[in-house]
Image (spheres, rainbow, N blue to C red):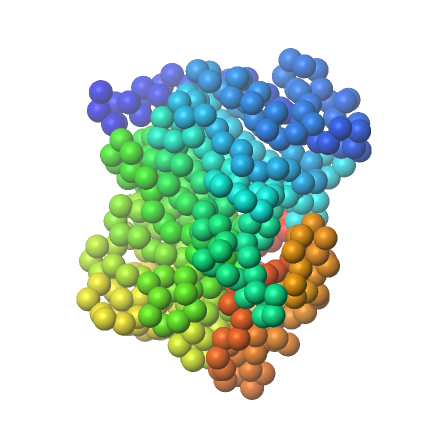
């Protein structure tokens, strides 16, 4: 059976009115658990005290069916290291993991966070999806805080990340799962010593799309590489990266000769037919906002419009607000080139328009030096403008040596890095714009 024939048969077999199941996850005796008692019927609505128990039930409900399973997770902390079985057949079904629910089951992920913790010896991603024999019609991961700090090691004197002693494993892994629509939305990816997550999805049909929207990528060594798995052949039709905040993500090594310097790594045509980046905020990523290492003639269609860029090239002692739109070798160059949006518009045949560069004044929450247990951290309220020297800048706009490498950040709900500059508030994550099924 051909790739296209398989896809069409899957779509034709999808029921017009698939059954919807709702799984409520909340700690025993908590206020959300008490509220869930009124909503549960043990037929289409269930309650579970832990996320892994709810996900076990979702596998049972999805395997071989056309069901839609919504796993609603209340505010609190959940143990990570959750792995779906390889071979789950939800080719006609949908799995929606929706965190960030308050006590009354309203969903406000940036006010009532669901934290996924991996522990100090984390041997695998905090959440992964089985492998390339696992099939979903739609897979949604929305409303979670993934903080990898517990499995990292930091220098107590400088609060710098000790990369060689930290867990260089992705925080979230799609694991090559086959899907027609992947949505990663409204999450916080924090303190990753390697990739925040891998877009290792395999397309189920020629219409497969990936939506990465409204996420915070904060203080990760490599937030994301736009590289799919490609199992079964074919290509993702569209990858959309919209309304995300990509702030303070670091080069693989803090030097100009590092192989991985940019926050987002662009991939060649195997990424997708078209890659769209729109409405995002890129600020204080020392090695560049996007890394472009492939020759332009090997790239997919690129549309990069209406984004805000600010100081993304301080690794190269370049403090211009607009610098670091692209960094990379573009194929034959022996050293990284550092480009602005204007240079890209002049030199490359991509759709690039309406991008801006000014200080969004994003606040950050830095952990006190020597802190070990993330659950006990009291983060310091600050604004990046006031700590420029820490990240290779000074208050006069010049550059200095990077004194600290990926210093540990804390989750401070009162000071999430939403822009404080009024004209910047249309860029990046928006608290009122969460995914709705």
Residue 425 visible in this rendered orientation of the protein: no
- The quadrant of the rendering that contains the C terminus is top right
Q: Nearer the viewer, residue 327 or 191?
A: 191
Residue 131 appears at what percent x and percent y?
38, 31
Left or right: where 301 falls relative to 325? left
Residue 320 appears at what percent x and percent y?
45, 79
Q: Residue at x 59, y 50 (%)?
A: 150
Q: Nearer the viewer, residue 275 or 246?
A: 246
418, above or below 132, in the image: below
Residue 80 appears at what percent x and percent y?
57, 38
76, above or below 275, in the image: above
- The quadrant of the rendering that contains the N terminus is top left
Left or right: where 435 falls relative to 237? right
The residue most toward the top is 43
Residue 61 visible in this rendered orientation of the protein: yes
Q: Residue at x 56, y 33 (%)?
A: 97
Q: Residue at x 49, y 56 (%)?
A: 165
135, above or below 15, in the image: below
Left or right: where 234 falls relative to 308? left
Q: Nearer the viewer, residue 68 or 258?
A: 258
Quarter of the figure with residue 292: bottom left
Residue 128 appears at what percent x and percent y?
47, 36
Number of labelled discs? Answer: 0
Q: Residue at x 32, y 31 (%)?
A: 205
Q: Nearer the viewer, residue 41 or 249?
A: 249
């Amino acid at each position: 059976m051909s790739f296209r024939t398989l896809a069409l048969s899957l779509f034709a077999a999808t029921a017009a009115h698939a059954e919807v199941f709702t799984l409520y996850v909340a700690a025993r005796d908590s206020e959300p658990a008490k509220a869930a008692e009124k909503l549960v019927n043990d037929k289409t609505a269930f309650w579970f005290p832990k996320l892994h128990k709810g996900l076990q039930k979702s596998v049972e409900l999805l395997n071989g069916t056309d069901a839609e399973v919504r796993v609603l997770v209340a505010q609190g902390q959940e143990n990570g290291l959750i792995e779906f079985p390889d071979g789950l057949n939800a080719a006609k079904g949908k799995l929606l993991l929706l965190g960030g629910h308050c006590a009354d089951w309203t969903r406000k992920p940036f006010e009532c966070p669901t934290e996924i913790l991996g522990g100090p010896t984390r041997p695998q991603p905090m959440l992964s999806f089985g492998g390339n024999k696992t099939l979903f019609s739609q897979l949604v991961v929305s409303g979670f805080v993934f903080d990898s700090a517990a499995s990292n090691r930091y220098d107590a004197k400088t609060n710098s990340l000790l990369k060689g002693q930290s867990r260089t494993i992705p925080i979230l892994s799609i694991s090559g799962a086959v899907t027609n629509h992947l949505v990663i939305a409204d999450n916080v990816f924090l303190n990753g010593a390697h990739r925040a997550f891998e877009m290792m999805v395999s397309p189920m049909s020629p219409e497969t799309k990936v939506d990465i929207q409204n996420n915070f990528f904060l203080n990760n060594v490599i937030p994301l590489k736009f590289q799919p798995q490609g199992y079964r052949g074919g290509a993702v039709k569209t990858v959309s990266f919209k309304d995300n905040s990509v702030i303070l993500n670091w080069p693989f090594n803090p030097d100009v000769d590092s192989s991985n310097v940019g926050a987002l790594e662009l991939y060649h045509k195997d990424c997708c037919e078209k890659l769209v980046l729109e409405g995002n905020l890129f600020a204080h990523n020392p090695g560049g906002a996007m890394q472009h290492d492939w020759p332009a003639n090997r790239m997919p269609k690129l549309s990069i419009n209406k984004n805000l860029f600010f100081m993304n090239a301080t690794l190269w002692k370049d403090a211009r607000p607009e610098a670091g739109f692209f960094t990379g070798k573009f194929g034959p160059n022996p050293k990284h080139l550092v480009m602005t949006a204007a240079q890209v518009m002049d030199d490359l045949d991509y759709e690039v328009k309406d991008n801006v560069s000014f200080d969004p004044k994003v606040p950050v929450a830095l952990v006190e030096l020597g802190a070990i247990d993330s659950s006990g951290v009291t983060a310091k309220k600050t604004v990046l403008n006031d700590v420029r020297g820490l990240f290779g800048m000074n208050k006069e706009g010049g550059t200095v040596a990077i004194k600290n490498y990926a210093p540990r950040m804390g989750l401070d709900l009162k000071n999430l890095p939403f822009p404080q500059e009024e004209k910047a508030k249309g860029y990046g994550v928006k608290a009122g714009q969460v995914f709705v099924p």
